[in-house]
Amino acid sequence: MTYEELIKRLDPAVYQSLKGALELGKWPDGRKLTDEQRSICMEAVIYYEEHHQIPAEERVGYLDRGAKAGTACDPSVARTAGKSSNGAADPDQFFEVKS
């Protein structure tokens, strides 16, 4: 069985357990996830969510930007806004704060 087949057949209860372990940083029995376990769990959860078309707002790592969506605080806007044609930052987007 390939990794892809394993994820496709993953039981929703196991998915929820993996997702909970990622959120808390530990297994249901209280043992801490190692970095390798965290990486494997994250990959499995992301693949499961993509394969089962889980809505974006229910996926691991989803950030509700709320009222800040589309503003300079929104990273998706900040990546493209304020850049000149040569890729340099636009100095007019910054301001100095003096105390």
Image (cartoon, grey):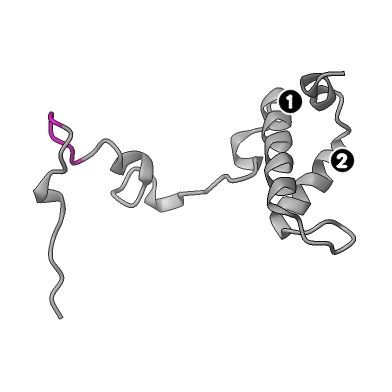
- Binning the other alpha carbons within 10 Å of mark 1 as few (below 14), some (14 to 19) or many (20 upward) gives few
Residue at left offset 16%, top offset 43%: 89
Q: Amino acid at mark 2?
A: Val
Q: Is residue 26 above or below residue 98?
A: above
Closer to the camera in the image, 1 or 76: 1
Query: Whole-percent x and y of residue 41?
Result: 74, 42
Whether residue 9 appears in magenta in the rendering, the answer is: no
Residue at left offset 26%, top offset 35%: 80
Closer to the camera in the image, 98 or 7: 7
Place residue 34 in its image quadrant. bottom right
Q: Is residue 28 left or right of residue 20?
A: right
Q: Is residue 69 left or right of residue 3?
A: left
In the image, the segment drawn in magenta is 82-86
Residue on which the image places disc 2: 14
Q: Amino acid at mark 1?
A: His
Q: Is residue 63 left or right of residue 79?
A: right
Report the mark closest to the observer, 1 or 2.
2
Place residue 26 in its image quadrant. bottom right
Q: Which disc is residue 64 wearing?
A: none
Question: On the rendered image, what quadrant is the C terminus found in?
Answer: bottom left
Q: Which residue lies most toward the left here?
A: 92
Mark before the other along the chain sequence, 1 or 2 = 2
Residue on which the image places disc 1: 52
Q: Helix, strand, or loop for circle 2?
A: helix
C-alpha gap between disc 1 and disc 2: 14 Å
Magenta-colored segment: predominant secondary structure: loop
- Binning the other alpha carbons within 10 Å of mark 2 as few (below 14), some (14 to 19) or many (20 upward) gives few
Residue at left offset 13%, top offset 76%: 98
Q: How many marks?
A: 2
Query: Whole-percent x and y of residue 23?
Result: 70, 55
